[in-house]
Amino acid sequence: MKPFEHEITEFDGHMLVNLQEGRFLIDTGSPTSFARGGRVSFGGAIEDVSDSAMGMLDADMLSRYVGTRLDGLVGMDILGRHRLTFVGSRLFVGEGVVENSAGTPIREETLIALETDDFMGIPIVSVNVNESPVRMFVDTGAKISYLDASMLSGFQIEETLHDFYPGVGEFDVGVSTVWADLNGWPFRAKFGRLPPLLQMALLIGGVDGILGRDLFTSYFIRIERGGKPVAFVPHI
């Protein structure tokens, strides 16, 4: 049996897929999906959705934030119904044999499972940064990762990026490249300093940071139904 497969494209670090209804952001950091036409075809199923996320974000606003036309967002209300395996530019949806970029099947025994929690379906994992464990949302919709500014005080700001977060709006953020690890397996990620309003919003979810796109370029990532557990396959 083979899982359904979507090809992932990228725009400014954001993970996108082309569906029957148009171009969508894949966002494990969002509890809800939305689409211009109120419908999303994903993983071989057709889902009816709202045309906005609680009236706060719709396809036009999302398009302005990301910088390219988008027709909606696929969040955890849909993603969480499936087993998801992210392998480079390929997203496998459902059960079955998953292949790496060389066409070799990924053996289930190579998956390293993480202790995973969730908030409103959004997966949460513990990441070691500066030898300190940090609870972070796993967010495919985030083009960079985020931490409290105090945890990045010893790192030089390498660049300033323009970004956004639903409910917070747009902002400029100083970014540093930092080594982190999952269960002792290292990866390098761009970490931005959390704006105060976003930091307050994260506290509601019981997390101290956001783990964004860099995780998915460092390892093959598996997210089971319901957002947990999260597992990864070292492929560096």
Image (spheres, rainbow, N blue to C red):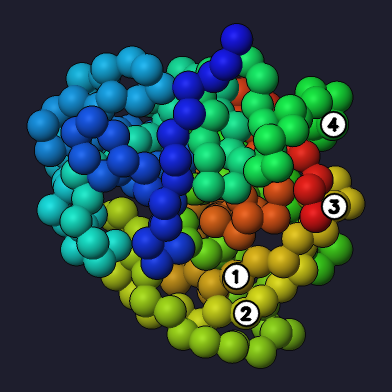
Up-down: is 204 above or below 61?
A: above
In space, the residues marked 2 and 3 are separated at their CA atoms by 20 Å
Q: Amino acid at mark 3?
A: Trp
Q: Which residue is mark 3?
A: 185
User: Disc 2, disc 3: CB below 8 Å?
Assistant: no
Count the marks: 4
Q: CA distance from mark 4 to mark 1?
A: 28 Å
Pinpoint residue 39: horizontal percent, then vertical percent: 19, 25
Mark 4 vs 2, N-terminal side: 4
For residue 110, which numbered disc appears in the image?
Answer: 4
**Does residue 42 sit above or below 128 in this rendering?**
above
At x 45% / y 45%, what residue is drawn? Answer: 8
Front residue of 15 and 212: 15
Would residue 103 appear left or right of 186 to someone viewing this image?
left
The kind of residue tagged 4 is Thr
Tell me the residue at 59%/88% (across/down). Answer: 158
Please, what is the three-letter code of the amino acid marked with disc 1?
Phe
Q: Residue drawn at (85%, 52%), measured in percent from left and top?
A: 185
The residue beneath circle 2 is 176
Instruction: Kindly identify the amino acid type of the residue bearing the numbered disc 2.
Output: Ser
Q: Helix, strand, or loop for circle 4?
A: helix
